[in-house]
Image (tube, helix red, strand yellow):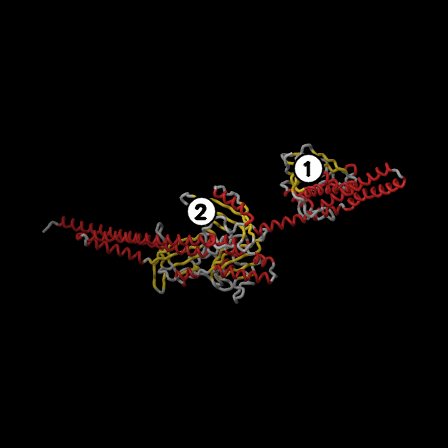
Amino acid sequence: MRPPAPRLRRIAAWAAALGLALLLIGLAAAWAGRREARLQADAARRSMEVHALALRDAAGKYRHLPFTAGLHPDLRAALAHPEDAAAQARANRYIAQVNREAGSDALYLIGTDGVTRAASNWDTPQSFVGHSYANRPYFVDALAGRGGMFYGVGQTTGEPGLFLSASVRAENGAVQGVVTVKVSLHPQQDAWAYARDPILLSDARGVVFLSSVPGWLYHTLRAVPPAELARMRSEQQYGPRPGFPALPWRVDRTAGEAGYLVRTELAGTARRFLAVDEPLPELGWTLTVLSDHAEVARAGERAWLLGLLGAAVLLLGGLYWQLRERRFAEQRDARQELELRVRERTQALDEAHAFRKAMEDSLLVGMRARDAEGRITYVNPAFCAMTGYAAEELLGRLPPYPYWHPDDVPQHWQHYEAMMRGEPALSGFESRLMHRGGREVITMVYTAPLVLADGTHAGWMSSVVDITEQKRAEQRQRQNDEQLQHAQRLASLGEMASTLAHELNQPLMALSNYASAAKAFAQQGRADLLADTLDEAVAQAQRSAEIVRRIRGFVRQHTAGHEDCAVDALVANALALVRGDMRQRGARAQVRIAPGLGAVRGDRVLLEQVLLNLIANALQAMEATPPQDRTVDIDAQACGGRLCIRVADRGPGIPAALAEQVFAPFFTTKPAGLGLGLNICRTIAEAHRGRLSFADRPGGGTVFTLELETTAP
């Protein structure tokens, strides 16, 4: 018999080897489980990327629709005139058309009181028109000037959806109402139904509102505080539900592990899942993807089996072949994963290209690309609509282009040649185009080099903005300003009507007296006195004609435009019109004009209107001033490279409480005044790139200063 010690040692060695093998196999099984968990987590994340992209696309596709629709004049008219049935009908038709073309569930317009004014389903039994959504967060956010986004069950239809909203602003920036679009996420939920493992989407409060497992809908991942629960009921986010039960989950989280373990029951069978969360912060949601945890357990079991099998066939070389096959499997998986990633990347690039093209096609600004030879290589629909030509008719064309205005061909060539020299106008230039239908289109064109990713200059990209309506509006504004200025000049002469009549009456009376004297001298045969008398009569007639000429020139509807105006002539003409008023008031003018002043480039009649208004205001301000102090001081001199004309009175001055309102329209201290004189004067000064201001005069009174640019003396 062998001694027991070696046998025990052998048994101990085999036991140690067996224990070591089991330990190694156990470690391998644990590693396989963790590896499978990581692989499942990675697969879940890849799946999440696809689902998250679909969710972001569903929200982003319609994010700007409310803002864009809110710019339409029919919607603003419906908000501004809620009692106008025709305006409401136009808004309903427009919203229905936009909703139909966009493919959204519903599009509707809400007033500031929360009541719907117009809706895309206005002609259906479930019309939103007349319903109040003032309790909805998307309405509150948009009314506050923020973009609203809210998922919930519709108050009217009972159908859930994503609500995106934007405010509708008036021209002064005030919020007139809210435009809201409702988008259904049922396509995403229907797609999840075909997924092998459960998928769910929860809001910021942890309430599940989309799930591939219907029984988990409107359950919570965590307890909802009473205040939040009350708010959800007030907002009716998920309809009139008595409560939100917790999900039938038992969750085990392990620090450092990918995802967490969920134990639950599906279709009456106890299941275990590996759950991975993906926050969607821009949407305020959390996407959760679950993977069957049985794969992790099976991975451990497989590791045990493979370990035991490898230990059993170690002497036969089975481990080598097993490792070899595993390596081939890993390579195959890596190749398949690489192919999958290539397909996903290709699909993402195709989607990005389609999105970019859709974005370019939806721009209101015309886009035109030309190569280095000037050949048109790209135009977007906005540019085609601007010119009336289809893209097929423009692509490949060299100048002269068919939309060039025939009267502006030299200017078009000039801008084209500057671009080809690499000298496009950095601030853009105005260009007149000829629409295919024969109408003129006025545009602003901004051109920049088109540089490829490798730095190669491939041509030129131009942004073309249609400013036809803007030009028309500016023309109407100029006409309105001219009419208002003309009305103010007439009002000024109306205030001085009696003094002007008296001023005109004096030479006429003198003319009558000289005519009577001339008749008497003629009868007496005194030729020398007759000639002198007739000369005096002619002088008085010329004086009358000069007064009439000044009045007629001052009240003309259309002025002569800009010219070089001497300062002394402007002051003299303004004083000539108020001379009678000054004589009647017992006032006088002291004029001091510095020598060598340059001429002022501007509209003579409008500048005289400013001086006349300032002098007339000075005379009226001194009504309570003693006659010996009623002096209007007019001073003209150069100041800081500009010309300053100061008109000062010795009246009571302007109270500090009224100083902020002096130039405000319709503000006046005169019983019969319109309150437009100083406002128009400041407008005229600013139109001449000048400035009109006032200050208190030392010793009492007010000084108005008119600053203007001068030409070279």
Residue 519 showing in the rendered view? yes
CA gap, disc 1 to disc 2? 54 Å
Instruction: Tell me the quadrant of the picture where the C terminus can be found.
Output: top right
* Badge 1 amino acid: Ala
Q: Quadrant of residue 312?
A: bottom left
* Badge 2 amino acid: Asp
Q: Nearer the viewer, residue 551 or 132?
A: 551
Rendered position, 105 above or below 431: below
Circle 1 sits on which residue?
A: 566
Residue name at image x 63 percent, y 43 percent: 687
Q: Nearer the viewer, residue 610 or 301?
A: 610
Residue name at image x 46 percent, y 52 percent: 395
Per the rendering, the mark at residue 371 is: 2
CA neighbours of label 2 inside 10 A, class few (<14), some (14 to 19), many (20+): some
Q: Nearer the viewer, residue 139 or 11?
A: 139
Q: Secondary structure at mark 2?
A: strand
- Label 1 or label 2, whichever comes before in sequence order: 2
Per the rendering, the mark at residue 614 is: none
Q: Please provide percent x and percent y for residue 504.
A: 79, 44
For the residues labelled 1 and 2, say whether their Cβ atoms are less than 8 Å apart.
Answer: no
